[in-house]
Image: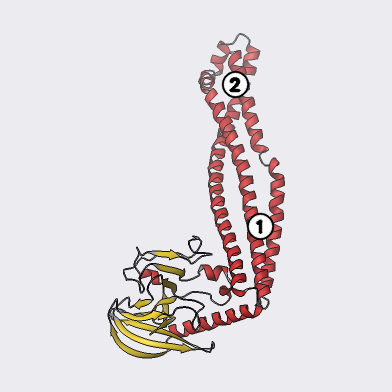
Amino acid sequence: MKRTILQLGTVLFTSLLVVCLFVTSGVSAESTEEKLQRLQVEIGQYQEEIERLNSQANTLSNQIAQYDAQIRLTTLRISETEEKILLLGGRIDQLEQSLNSLNNAFTSRVTQTYKMARLNDPFVFLLLSEDIDKAVSSYHYLKKIQEADRDLLIRLEKAQINYQVEKEDQEDLQDELKDQKASLDAQKAAKANLLEVTRNDEKRYQDLLAAARSEFEAIQAILAGQGDEEEVGHVNAGEKIATIIQGASCNSSGTHLHFMVSSDNTSRNPFEYLRSGIDFEDCSGSSCGSGDGDNFNPTGSWDWPISPKIKYTQGYGSTWAIRNTWVGRIYGFHNGIDINSEFNPDIKAVKSGTLYRGSYGGSGGCRLRYVRVDHDDSDLDTLYLHINY
């Protein structure tokens, strides 16, 4: 019996050590928490700086300063997330050690628990004891061990829940870190692109802004039915209706077709109508094939207006360019997709309908040419911009 009580005392001591480990688990992380607080202060400062720069005149130097501030802000957020992962990792390691200690303690108590159940009756306990005073003292001691075990079991259950929650939090932080690093790469690429296209020249930057404003104005006006149009006649699906202008043209800095789908003068996502399984190259992000650009997710049944291989340069909605480049100061939303054919500039009607040729002359001092097909079988129109007819 003495050996049994000694073994139980050893288990109780082990249990108390585990409890102490829970209580002290946050002490060693103090320096990490201080670093997190400092990072949060710096993040707030850079957020205020970006807001200040946004309110100032749209100059090249201001835009570069915004990129620098945004890059620094994202870098700080990456450091913050890494520190959170480090802090959480330490807590998870401690929880794992505690769980192992608890599990080992309870495993070693299988035999003692059975004996304790037999000795739980005080009369049996007295009958088996040679010394009544020691027996009474041992019995009370055993009762305390039982209470400690019940408390320890509750702590074990809580620790298991906390361990699972924090493991899930760690996985979420890892995903967040991956997204932040991708965003940082995109911001650096956008700054490099700005310096490349402007050649660090203020006049060239202002010319690009003016061209973007003019294009946005023209596209919005055409979508609203304000272009000058002439009816050509009926066309069938797959019939050639125009060609893509090669090189720069009115409101366009390079070769591409701006393809839109509209209903009641409101744009619709072309990917809801165009079929999948097309051979394409994704150039909608920081570079061709970078994988950080816009979604390419057609789900419809229409054939494409141009022949593959298709070069995809901008998507529908809040695109990579709008989120990461100076274009976002002009466009809030891209109402079509920008595409080009690697081998053939011909444009074909995606559906049968009535063909219209049109143009719009806005503030840019040129006329943007387009064609529109009013579909036979629905209230949809398709519009094809930056083309010759």
What residue sits 59% from the left and 38% below the top? 95
- The label shown at residue 8 is 2
Q: As drawn, is 239 to the left or to the right of 228? A: left
**The residue under label 2 is which amino acid type?**
Leu
Apparent side of residue 148 relative to residue 338 in the rendered image (left or right): right
Image disc number at residue 76: 1
Label 2 Cα crowd, 10 Å radius (few <14 / some 14-19 / many 20+): many
Q: How many marks?
A: 2
Number of other residues with Cα within 10 Å of mark 1, as a class: few under 14, some 14 to 19, many 20 or more: some
The image quadrant where one finds the N terminus is: top right
Residue 209 place in picture, x, y as percent: 58, 79
Q: Position of residue 359 (x, y in %)?
A: 43, 88
* Amino acid type at image mark 1: Leu
Q: Secondary structure at mark 1?
A: helix
Residue placed most toward the observer, 16 or 244: 244
Could you say which is closer to the camera, residue 354 or residue 143? 354
For the question of whether residue 168 can be seen, the reply is yes
